[in-house]
Amino acid sequence: MMLSIEMQNLSRSNAELQEFAKIAAHDLQEPLKSVQGFVDLLKRRYSDQLGDDGKRFIVFIDDAVVRMEQLIRGVLDHSKIRSQEKRFERTNLNAVVQQVKENLSVSIEQTGARINSDELPEIIADQLQMVQLFQNLLANALKFRNPDTAPEINISWRRGAEGEYQFSVKDNGIGMDSRYLNKIFGMFSRLNAKTEYPGTGIGLAICKKIVEHHGGVIWAESQLGKGSELCFSLPDETRR
């Protein structure tokens, strides 16, 4: 009985937290739109009076607005994952990866990246969340690439000891100190300066939430300067 009450309280707290995140993100968007609107007005009307310093400051404001917009979208995406109704269906992961490669085609072309993939299985999953999961993982590998080497990303899978799917996204990027492997899936987690590697620090937290929403586990293996391997497991729902 006590356990049931605690579970109900936990469920209610999670729902309230998700609702708070949505409201807070919405309320943040309005003043942000005002800031962007006035900055655009300033550029149109007074651009020739700003001088070099003024124009540089405007660029800083524009960049800050973009980062804030990305942050708000990330918080909203993170809050929605568990609140969404489960839309699990047969999902062709080869088609998912192809869609992700098309979505990231500009970055792939600019970096000269090569993405290799095993023939992936068809699984029972939320297809849109699988696209988001693989897109975040591949975007992470492209972002933290070695500046002297074209990115090479390998996607593979195997069966785990209990019949689950185990997937791997392995890259030849800058890698990370093994001491920080547990930290990277936290909200707003950053191991590098944003000036060097821009971003919100939410992408891998969203990956973690998606994997857990599907009953799986996500983890990382890496060595500084030797690339990273981001792995996750998913249960085989077709066997149930």
Image (spheres, rainbow, N blue to C red):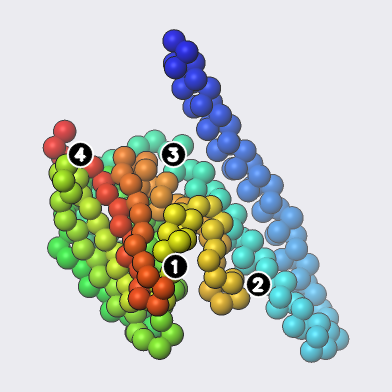
Q: How many marks?
A: 4
Amino acid residing under circle 2 = Asp
| Amino acid type, label 3 | Arg
Instruction: Identify residue type, mark 4.
Output: Glu
N-term-proximal mark, 3 vs 4: 3
- Identify the residue under disc 4: 237
Seen in the picture, residue 24 relative to 62 is either above or below; the reply is above
Query: Residue at horizontal 23%, vertical 42%?
Result: 235
Q: Is residue 114 visible?
A: yes
Crowd band around label 4 with a 10 angstrom C-alpha radius: few (<14), some (14–19), many (20+): some
The kind of secondary structure element at disc 1 is loop
| Residue at disc 4, secondary structure | helix
Residue bearing the label numbered 2? 63
CA separation, marks 2 and 3? 31 Å
The residue that appears at 35% across and 73% down in the rendered structure is 227
**Labels 3 & 1 near each other (Cβ < 8 A):** no
Q: Position of residue 49 (x, y in %)?
A: 86, 86
Between tags 3 and 1, which lies in front?
1
Looking at the image, residue 73 lies above or below residue 37: above
Q: What residue is disc 1 on?
A: 177
Mark 3 Cα-neighbour bin, 10 Å: few <14, some 14–19, many ≥20 = some
Q: Position of residue 112 (x, y in %)?
A: 34, 84
Relative image position of residue 178 (x, y in whole percent): 41, 64
Callout in the foreground (2, 1): 1
Of residue 210 and residue 230, the one placed in the foreground of this image is 230
Q: Earlier in the sequence, mark 4 or mark 1?
A: 1
Assess whether mark 1 and mark 2 are in contact (beta carbons under 8 angstroms). Answer: no
At a point 44% along the width and 43% down the height, the residue shown is 81
Residue 191 position in % (x across, y down): 53, 66
